[in-house]
Image (cartoon, helix red, strand yellow):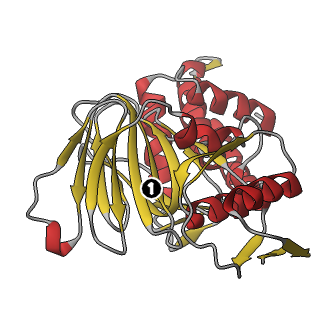
């Protein structure tokens, strides 16, 4: 059994074609594997795991008794299958958080590691990522974002922590296991839905927007914990002004300004200065400093495939900023 054959079996698991027993074996093996203080899922680690499993298969083959003049090949097949499925978990640990073909651990601009049973993913400026969870849920993570989640969900809970940044969550339905996303300010719970959370430390607003389904948003701020959770229906959102502490709920019609980032599009509707500049920074991997006197923005506009210069020219013209300079990756608005 070579590495390619193991990957075929792994793909069978990823497509949901394994038996329930095989799937459980993969998850149990990975859970045990991650009990170490920290595991980096690189190629050398995977090859070591495969080598160890192949050795175990060889030992099991020798240990199988001969019945008459024939070995019990049915038992051998089961033993080999079980062992191979366990080995596939090491590779699966990389594939569970990947784009169509490239492991996150090797992808430029994305940091991925596993520690104490948790997966940590961090994206740099200019990079977005798609993460497929074991329950079938899909997370699209925006640039400059940090996310963590358990290697394996348990106790009928699906906790996700968006420690920084923005993400779109498309949640697989499971009424027995609520899917909860925690940010520093809120806990957002869904049973099967799609919603977007934007929570950047450098921005003055936190927003949670529901696309379809139904979610419950709980305010984690100590002064407001006594308030009842807010229930959102499709095309509703809650927005927190971090400076004033005011939390309000409103409705929206157009989803484009909320989720267009996942397609590489910059779309704004009445956006503040920090929202616009942070989005441009994340899209083009630059740092922007506003030295002009124009600080109160309410910008509306969409950019699809425009260059950085074209975006800056349009934004500056609209907001009454006379000029800007670019030195390497640093931009100054004058």
Q: Is residue 101 visible?
A: yes
Out of 214 and 10, give the one closest to the viewer: 214
> Residue 306's x, y, as percent?
84, 45
Q: Residues within 10 Å of mark 1 (few under 14, many from 20)?
A: some
**Quadrant housing residue 99:** top right
Q: Quadrant of the N terminus?
A: top right
Q: How many marks?
A: 1
Out of 179 and 76, give the one closest to the viewer: 179
**Quadrant housing residue 74:** top right
Q: Is residue 173 left or right of residue 25?
A: left
Out of 153 and 68, give the one closest to the viewer: 153
Q: Is residue 157 left or right of residue 108?
A: left
Q: In the figure, 77 relative to 293: above or below?
A: above
Q: Is residue 293 left or right of residue 101?
A: left
Question: Which element type, helix, strand or loop, lies under badge 1?
Answer: strand
Q: Quadrant of the C terminus?
A: bottom right
* Residue under numbered circle 1: 149
**Quadrant housing residue 73:** top right
> Residue 262's x, y, as percent?
64, 41
Residue that appears at 36% across and 71% down = 242
Residue that appears at 37% across and 32% down = 235
Q: In the figure, 180 relative to 123: above or below?
A: above
Q: Is residue 32 left or right of residue 244?
A: right
Q: In the current view of this chain or complex, which residue is farthest to the bottom?
A: 291
> Residue 180's x, y, as percent?
31, 49
Residue that appears at 54% across and 68% down = 296
Q: In the figure, 331 relative to 218: above or below?
A: below
Q: Is residue 43 visible?
A: no
> Residue 273's x, y, as percent?
59, 65
């Amino acid at each position: 059994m070579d590495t390619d054959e193991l990957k075929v079996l792994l793909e069978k698991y990823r497509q949901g074609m394994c038996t329930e027993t095989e799937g459980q074996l993969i998850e149990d093996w990975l859970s045990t594997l991650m009990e170490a203080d920290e595991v980096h899922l690189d190629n050398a680690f995977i090859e070591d795991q495969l080598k160890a499993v192949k050795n175990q298969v060889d030992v099991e083959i020798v240990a199988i008794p001969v019945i008459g003049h024939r070995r019990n090949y049915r038992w051998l097949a089961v033993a080999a299958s079980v062992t191979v499925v366990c080995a596939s978990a090491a590779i699966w640990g990389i594939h569970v958080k990947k784009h169509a073909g490239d492991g996150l651990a090797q992808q430029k601009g994305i940091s991925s590691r596993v520690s104490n049973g948790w997966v940590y993913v961090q994206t740099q400026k200019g990079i977005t990522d798609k993460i497929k969870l074991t329950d079938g849920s899909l997370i699209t993570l925006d640039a400059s974002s940090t996310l963590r989640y358990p290697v394996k969900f348990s106790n009928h809970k699906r906790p996700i922590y968006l420690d920084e940044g923005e993400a779109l969550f498309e949640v697989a339905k499971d009424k027995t296991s609520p899917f909860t996303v925690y940010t520093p300010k809120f806990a957002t719970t869904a049973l099967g839905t799609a919603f977007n959370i934007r929570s950047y430390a450098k921005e003055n607003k936190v927003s949670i927007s529901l696309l379809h389904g139904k979610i419950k948003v709980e305010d984690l701020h100590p002064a407001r914990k006594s308030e009842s959770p807010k229930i959102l229906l499709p095309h509703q959102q809650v927005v927190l002004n971090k400076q004033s502490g005011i939390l309000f709920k409103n409705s929206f019609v157009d989803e484009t300004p909320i989720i267009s980032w996942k397609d590489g599009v910059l779309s704004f509707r009445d956006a503040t200065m920090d929202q616009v500049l942070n989005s441009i920074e994340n899209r083009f991997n630059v740092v922007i400093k506003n030295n002009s006197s124009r600080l109160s923005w309410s910008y509306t506009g969409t950019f699809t495939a425009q260059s950085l210069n074209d975006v800056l020219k349009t934004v500056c013209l609209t907001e009454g900023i006379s000029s800007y300079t670019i030195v390497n990756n640093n931009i100054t608005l004058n």
